[in-house]
Image: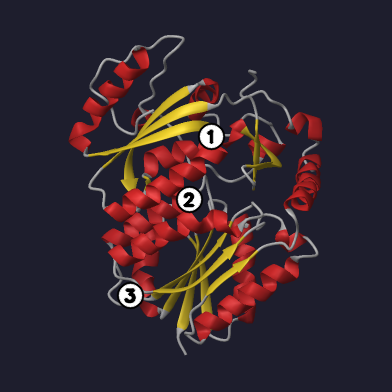
Amino acid sequence: MGKIMILNGSPRAPKSNSKRYAEIFSKYCTAETEYYNITKKNHLELCAKMEDYSDVLFVFPLYADSLPVVFLNFLKTLEANPPRRKPVISILINCGFLEYQQNKVAIRMMKFFCHQNHYIIGSILMLGSGEAILDTPFRYVATRNIRKLAQSIASKNYQLIRATMPLTKKLFLMASTIYWKRFGQKFGTTKEQMQTMEIEGEN
Amino acid sequence: MSDKPLDISIRQDSETRYFDLSSLKIANCMGCFGCWTKTPGKCVIRDDATKVYPCIAKSDKVLYVSRLKYGGYDTIMKTMLERAIPVQQAFIRIHNGETHHVQRAVVPKEATIIAYGNISDEEKDIFRQLVARNASNMSFSSHEIIFTTESMVEDQVKRILEKWEK
């Protein structure tokens, strides 16, 4: 059985949902896993380590409709410093919107990168409603599909998996409003203050 | 807004603003959600990005010049676009049949994007999809993409500016 390297490409990697997803992945994966945050300073070290693994799982959020820039920068370093032996690349991407389909452009960019740099694409999990899902009754949706992802990579029976909260758009809108209102309350910010139309104090 | 200096004369007044992003100090978005939940409408990182995103929000026409990488914006432009999220609220709305963030005082805009570099057909196709997604999240009422080589960027910018002045 191979060994899987998990790389977290979230800009807030140590405190990210991506980290929590990676932990669930490791919990259910029957193969050995090793986890790393991508930081500004460790690109070359991670590129060199990659050759020790049969598979790499990139975990990252959708940012401004595509790859987070911290992750994009890592891919550019990887392109310039490829490992001697190339692992199979799998992806776990999450977006805060209900529709997992909003991740499609980022997946196309990843496929383009892999094709251009001769990496085989393994499994892909596109997750919608990923900002909040782990703290809701729908946590099981994320857990179940991450387990499926882990099994597919460990068994090399690679798959495309899609998941989101089983809610209508209107219900999702209501649930997300409650989520963000509570988020603001932690900092003493009211819903009305969060709804300001002002940008840098100007309307 | 350009990711490289443009060697052309661009009028700078109350109606037109030009930003050479490569000359500005703009850090990466940390994903802290501070601009939605702690200081709504203001980024907690007080660098040059805070001068740029209010202008993006107020503009009814934008011209973005960016190198392409893997079918998306390269680092400089992408860094700025990620830092522009204070123009949105945390709250979600249904827009064009999908869930998207509510916008603050953002004027709907005609967007022109000049994408340059050695661009394959596949990258062009990915980028067209990306900009179509940006349209929903960045209030583009219409958009045009011009693919070109780096050496032709300034000619293309001049052409767009002349068109705007007519």
B56 relative to B144 in the view: left or right: right
Residue position marked by numbered label 1 in the rendering:
B84
Residue position marked by numbered label 2 in the rendering:
A66
Quarter holding residue A101: bottom right
User: What chain letter is assigned to the residue under label 3?
Assistant: A
The image quadrant where one finds the C terminus of chain A is top right
**Amino acid at the residue labelled 2:** Ser
User: What chain letter is assigned to the residue under label 1?
Assistant: B
- Residue found at x 80% / y 30%: A192
- Can marks 1 and 3 be said to lie on one chain? no
- Residue found at x 44% / y 55%: A71
Residue A39 visible, this angle: no
Closer to the eye: label 2 or 1: 2
User: What chain letter is assigned to the residue under label 2?
Assistant: A
Q: Label 1: few (<14), some or many (≥20) within 10 Å?
A: many
**Amino acid at the residue labelled 3:** Lys
Q: Which mark is residue A120?
A: none
Residue position marked by numbered label 3 in the rendering:
A86
A136 relative to B8 in the view: left or right: right
Residue at the far left: name it.
B151
Q: Earlier in the sequence, mark 2 or mark 3?
A: 2
B106 relative to A189 in the view: left or right: left
Q: Is mark 3 on a helix, strand or loop?
A: loop
Closer to the eye: label 2 or 3: 2
Q: Is mark 2 on a helix, strand or loop?
A: loop
